[in-house]
Structure formats: C-alpha cells, structure tokens
Image: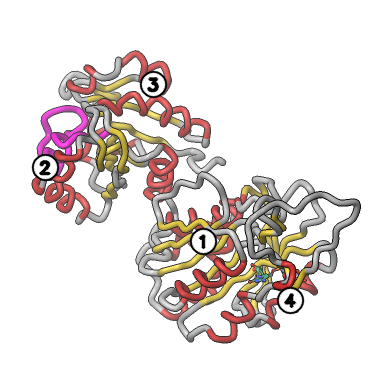
C-alpha cells in the first residue's frame, strides 16, 4: 500500500521502553510511500534508543536539543511545524503527556508539539498500568483529546516490560499506522458520527468437524472499506471471517452464514449503513445430513452432499432499511457483470452495488488490486479504474457519501474541496 505517498512525517520519541518499536514504524512508513520521516528525541529517550539508530533508519538528522538547531536560519521547532504533515509522539510517556497538556515547551519534542497547532498530532502512549490508570494521566489525555488536531491511540492490554500485566502496552504498529493514516486522510471527517457495519471474508459452512464449504475470498476489499471508514471518522463494526485480524475499531470474528446473518441484522438496527462485502456461501448442508455428533466423515469411493440454499442476508435487510440508512452490496460475477449486478441491485433493494469481475486474475479475489463499477438505482454509474483496494474503497465511499449523505446534511467544513480533488483522481 502507498497510503503515505508524498507525506512528510515527524516522529517525537520520548523516554519509554517501547522506543525501540519506532525503528519498525519508520520502516513501515517508508514502505508505504512516505517521502520523509524525521525524528526528534527528548533527553530521556536517549537512554532507551541511540540517536544513530534513528538517524540511520530515517535517513535524516535527529533533532535532540531545543536551542541548538536551525533549519535555513529558522529555529528547528518552527521549521518542522511548517514543513512536516503530521507529528507522531511515540512512545508518549506520562511526563510528556503532562507537559503537552499544560502547554509546556522544555525540550525539542514538547516545543515542536506546541508549535504544531494547525496540523494533526497523533499521541501513542505507553506506560505501566498504574501510571495509565492514574486519574491525573487520564485528565491530561482528556485535555489533549479535546483539541481538534490531536488524536490519542489507546494502548493495549498485555504483558508489560515491568513484568506486570495490564493496560498500557504500546498499540500494535498496524494500529498506529491506521491512526496516522486517519490523521492525514483528505476526508477524515466525511463519515463522522456515522455508525457503519461492514462484512468481510468468505463464510464457512461445516460439513463435519473437520471440513467446510467456503470460497476464495481474501476479505481484503471488505477490510480496506472498514479501514477507510475508520480513517473517515466512522464508528465501524467489522464482521469478518479472517484469522489474526487486529484493528482499533470493533471487530467480531464469525464463521457461518447463520452467525453472519444474526450479527448483521442485530447491529444494522442501530447503524446508519451496511457495506456487505462478505462472500456469503449460497449453500449449506441440508438439515437431514447434518450429524448430531461431532466427528469426521470417513472416506468412501463416492460421497454425495445434500445441500440447501442459505438465507440471503441482503435480500432481507434491503427492503426493510429505514430512510436514513444505506445498504451497499457487492456482485461477484464471471460474465455479463453489469447486467447481473444491476439485477441484484434491484432485487435486493440496495442503494448501491459494487460490480466485481472475478474472471480476471489480476484483480479481485486475493489480489491487492481491484477494478470495479459502482451502480446506483437511478442508473448513475462510475467505473473505478484498476487501483489498490484502499483507493477503490476510498473512491466508492466518497461516491456513496455524495449520493446519499451529502444531501441529508450540510457538508462538514473543508471537505468539499477534498471531495472534488479526490473524485477527479
Ligand atoms: N449475499 C448475502 N447473502 C447471501 C449471499 C450473498 O447477503 N446468502 C450478499 C453478498 O454479500 C453480496 C451480494 O449479496 O453483497 C451479492 O452476492 P453474490 O454472491 O454476488 O450474489 P448472490 O445473491 O449470492 O447470487 P449468485 O451467487 O447466484 O450470483
């Protein structure tokens, strides 16, 4: 993914054992296209990680002192605030959080932070559980969170370096990356206050205790949509079937069509929208064939499975949706792609359908790329050319917003321009 293309990212490292994880973060940012990653350190950070390490990985000067450095004659903290797109304080110690909450500026990190007023700051705390639970730390975080340009990445619960177990562990690098992406996202407020359910991945219908009926969906498109929605400010619930998924928004892992139907229907009631990207199995074992006891069917020369149709989740939800709710479906087609997609759009009473040509091996199933056509009920359609799935996800969410949500509410300030520049991409 190239989510950080042309972005200049400033990292402020403070004193904490998790400081070594910044090394991987720098790598990940460059791998995702960042044009420049610049680091700066508080005096105590130097006890945890050597400036040379950061300098080598970031390929850039490491700022360490408040008053010694200038860039083209401008004090470093002013120049950095002018030049860089986002400031990430990672790991953020209780000490630095307290100083920032009180507007203190006693080292290069806190001084630059106080100068970073019109650009996003992402704070990634990491500390011992009791420090984290201290009401003073929480109060300071609330103060920082109340500022429009600051976001806080919640720490995880886990084994801490001090030997204790609890909340305070640095968030996973994937989570930190997603928060930084959110901070620089051109439409970061587009779906603010919207609660959206997204489904992703192929369902599994058990045959016996060992085998199942499933499909080749990787779930990447659905996860990309959930990530984009998160980055656009939505309250996301992802219902998925994938192993090892770790996300900062709510996720529920499930397997069967029955489970997916239950959770989708239940959560859609309170939601503003549903994006049904899951590849739902159309068949399940007939009741008559389901074994009452767990076990493995023994092999034989031939074996016939008696299958029946599963319930069609979207067909049940589409016609019942309320005025303010949107429902988006996907159509995975081998031929006559648009004809079948339009038929599904009408029959399932959807607001929008995303037509996927699954006959091509360079896009769709398993690939990081996709090329889709989106269709609306009023016959309007948009062809989204081949691009990484996160770009496709972003584009289709912008179209969805313009078609349904923009009309119902005043556009959030400053988003109009971002929308125009985006859709012409
Ligand atoms: N879908 C669903 N419940 C099912 C099957 C599909 O909600 N039992 C949803 C999918 O998540 C997708 C849309 O319906 O958003 C279309 O799915 P697709 O598999 O393309 O179409 P089907 O309706 O299953 O028809 P067919 O397999 O015959 O093409």
Q: Earlier in the sequence, mark 1 or mark 4?
A: 1
In front: label 4 or label 2 = 4
In front: label 1 or label 4 = 1
Q: Residues within 10 Å of mark 1 (few under 14, many from 20)?
A: many
Q: What stretch is highlighted in magenta?
A: 91-112
Q: Residues within 10 Å of mark 2 (few under 14, many from 20)?
A: some
Q: Distance from label 1 to label 3 (Cα)?
A: 41 Å
Q: Earlier in the sequence, mark 3 or mark 4?
A: 3
Q: According to the image, what is the colour scheme of the structure? A: secondary structure
Picture residue at 21% right of the left edge, 38% below the top = 113
Q: Is mark 3 on a helix, strand or loop?
A: loop
Q: Earlier in the sequence, mark 4 or mark 2?
A: 2
Towards the viewer: 223 or 163: 163
Residue at label 1?
239
In front: label 1 or label 3 = 1
Above or below, comparing residue 57 to residue 309 in the picture: above
Q: What number is the disc on residue 103? A: 2
Residue 83 in picture, x, y percent from top left: 34, 36
Q: Does the residue labelled 3 lie within 8 Å of ligand 1?
A: no
Q: Distance from label 3 to label 2 (Cα)?
A: 27 Å
Residue at label 4?
342
Residue at label 3?
60
Picture residue at 82% right of the left edge, 49% below the top = 299
Q: Distance from label 2 to label 1 (Cα)?
A: 41 Å
Above or below, comparing residue 321 to residue 385 in the picture: below
Quick one: quadrant of the C terminus?
A: bottom right
Above or below, comparing residue 277 to residue 121 in the picture: below
């Amino acid at each position: 993914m190239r989510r950080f293309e042309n972005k200049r990212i400033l990292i402020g490292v403070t004193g904490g054992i998790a400081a070594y994880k910044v090394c991987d973060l720098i790598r990940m940012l460059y791998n995702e296209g960042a044009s420049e990653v610049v680091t700066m350190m508080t005096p105590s950070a130097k006890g945890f990680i050597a400036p040379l390490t950061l300098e080598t990985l970031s390929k850039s000067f490491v700022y360490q002192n408040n008053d010694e450095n200038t860039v083209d004659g401008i004090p470093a903290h002013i120049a950095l605030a002018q030049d860089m797109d986002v400031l990430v304080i990672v790991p953020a110690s209780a000490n630095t959080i307290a100083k920032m909450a009180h507007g203190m500026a006693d080292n290069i990190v806190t001084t630059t932070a106080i100068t970073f007023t019109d650009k996003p700051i992402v704070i990634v705390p990491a500390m011992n559980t009791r420090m984290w639970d201290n009401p003073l730390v929480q109060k300071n975080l609330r103060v920082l969170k109340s500022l429009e340009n600051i976001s806080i990445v919640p720490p995880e619960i886990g084994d801490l370096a001090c030997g204790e177990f609890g909340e305070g562990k640095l968030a996973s690098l994937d989570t930190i990356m997603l928060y930084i992406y959110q901070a620089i996202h051109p439409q970061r407020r587009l779906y603010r206050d919207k609660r959206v359910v997204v489904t992703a991945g192929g369902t599994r219908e058990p045959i016996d205790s060992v085998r199942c009926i499933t499909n080749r969906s990787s779930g990447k498109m659905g996860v990309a949509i959930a990530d984009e929605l998160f980055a656009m400010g939505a309250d996301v619930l992802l219902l998925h079937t994938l192993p090892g998924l770790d996300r900062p928004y709510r996720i529920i892992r499930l397997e069967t069509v029955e489970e997916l139907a239950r959770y989708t229907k239940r959560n859609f009631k309170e939601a503003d929208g549903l994006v049904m990207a899951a590849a739902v199995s159309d068949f399940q074992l007939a009741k008559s064939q389901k074994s009452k006891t767990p076990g493995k069917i023994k092999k034989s020369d031939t074996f016939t499975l008696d299958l029946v149709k599963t319930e069609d989740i979207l067909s049940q939800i589409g016609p019942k949706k309320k005025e303010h709710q949107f429902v988006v479906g996907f159509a995975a087609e081998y031929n006559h792609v648009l004809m079948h997609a339009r038929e599904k759009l009408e029959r399932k009473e959807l607001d929008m359908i995303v037509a996927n040509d699954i006959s091509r091996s360079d896009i769709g199933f398993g690939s990081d790329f996709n090329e889709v056509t989106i269709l609306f009920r009023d016959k309007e359609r948009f062809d989204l050319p081949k691009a990484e799935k996160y770009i496709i996800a972003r584009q289709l969410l912008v179209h969805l917003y313009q078609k349904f949500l923009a009309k119902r509410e005043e556009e959030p300030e400053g988003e109009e321009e971002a929308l125009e520049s985006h859709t012409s991409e």
